[in-house]
Amino acid sequence: MSTTVSLPAPTAAPTGRVAWASMIGTSLESFDFYVFAYFSAYFIGPLFFDPLGSFGGTLASFSTIAVAFVVRPIGAVLFGHMGDRLGRRATLLWTVALMGVATGLIGALPTYAQAGWLGAILLVLLRIVQGLSLGGEWGGSILLATEHSGPVKRAFYAAVPQLGSPVGSILSAAVFIAMTLTMPAAQLAAWGWRIPFLLAIPLLAVSLYLRWSIDETPVFREVVAEGRRDRLPIATLFARRPAAFVIAIGAALLGIGSYSLMNTYTIDYGVSKLGFSFQDLLVATTIGALLQLITIPLFGVWANRIGSARVVAWGALGTLLITFPMYFLLQFATFPILVATMIIGGILPTMSWAALGGLMNDLFPDHFRYSALSVAYAIAATVSGFVPLLTLVLGQSTGYAWWHPGIILAVLSAVTLVAAVTAARRRAEPESGQEPETDADRDSAPAV
């Protein structure tokens, strides 16, 4: 038996502090994750896996990247449960704290020369913590923004946390470029590599301050007051919305997978096969990320006008149409073509990325929405983590034909297009995010 309490009406739009809290938190998560990716190929192997040799050390360092992707769905289940049971705000404090502390501790780890395999073991454990944290961050940030907003601007505010990815990418790339230009390689290997990881500590302080100072979302407070929390939100998700769950995964593939393809595989492919310098590729990807700072809010505004699912669909269709011409032109290996590829090949998938949160938010009711968004996104991210490997295998089997990356990007685009069109045709949820239920459908917790 639940007791209904009087609640203030949801605010018409999120305050600036709420919007910043959602975006800066995802920026910190992205920065921490990308910093490790940038530095792993150059320093992690020799510092922590030196006895394995050059190839073995590099393989081990890349494996530590994969570990975080593998555990990400576990974190999504864990923090999704917390978000639907304990609240969005409290859960996001945990996710950002775990990521910031784990990243800072990586910067303080002893190397193999200092403590043998202890540093490598601790590194893997901290990467697991980072992966668990990432599993709960994205879905909560979307809900923090959308559940403080009114229905008129909800799609726009769902796009705000998406700015965290390009911001994190830009910051990590800027740190990498600045350090490689200003520090000799010997100093970087000796102690300079620690600096980017230790920078996570002051960034964490800002993120915690912003998230601590905001209120719980009105939507979750209403769920609590009405006694509609599920005992096992993830079980309710699979029982009540399995089709919507599959749609959400498909809708997320292009936005996540294209980034993995363009910023991981294409960089390696550009250096090893097309003759670009690493600096040229890093500059080109940074230009593309800077452009996202403009396009993501604009696509969020467009999603307010025509609906998030339609914006995702248009982005997927556009990407599908330009995929093969883009990779054909890239073979000419000029810097202007490279920049144009990163811009054009980034804008259209960004369209699908910017509106993804709004699409997924509309697919699920409020009482298990955190679990639904987190787990669906985490599964799509895990699948996308294998995109560079699949593209490499396809490249080897085709003699690195110019069209081989286009096959992967076209498949991602087609899956997301079908998912987005299907999502657009589904009946929209009521504005409160609720749906008719019986007592048998859920095991409500007492209201607080």
Image (spheres, rainbow, N blue to C red):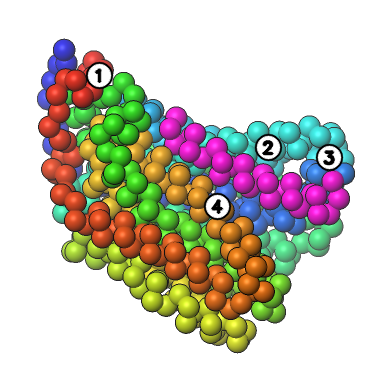
Q: Within 10 angstroms of label 4, few (less than 14), some, or many (20 or more) residues?
A: many
Relative side of 7 to 199, left or right? left
Relative side of 42 to 264, left or right? right
Given this view, does label 3 or label 4 mark the residue nearer the observer?
Answer: 4
> Is residue 80 on the magenta stretch?
no
Magenta span of residues:
52-78
Q: Are marks 1 and 4 in contact (CB under 8 Å)?
A: no
Q: Which is nearer the N-term, disc 2 or disc 1?
A: 2
Q: In terms of secondary structure, where does tag 3 sit?
A: helix
**Residue assigned mark 1:** 443
Given this view, does label 2 or label 4 mark the residue nearer the observer?
Answer: 4
- Label of residue 124 in the image: 2
Relative side of 120 to 133, left or right? right
Tag 3: amino acid: Tyr
At a point 25% along the width and 46% down the height, the residue shown is 363
At a point 83% along the width and 54% down the height, the residue shown is 54
Q: In terms of secondary structure, where does tag 1 sit?
A: loop
At a point 65% along the width and 68% down the height, the residue shown is 397
Q: What distance separates the C-alpha of mark 3 from that of mark 4?
A: 28 Å
Tag 2: amino acid: Val
- Label of residue 112 in the image: 3
Q: Which is nearer the N-term, disc 1 or disc 4?
A: 4
Q: Whole-percent x and y of residue 281?
A: 62, 72
Tag 1: amino acid: Asp
Q: Are marks 3 and 2 in contact (CB under 8 Å)?
A: no
**Residue assigned mark 4:** 385
> Is residue 65 on the magenta stretch?
yes
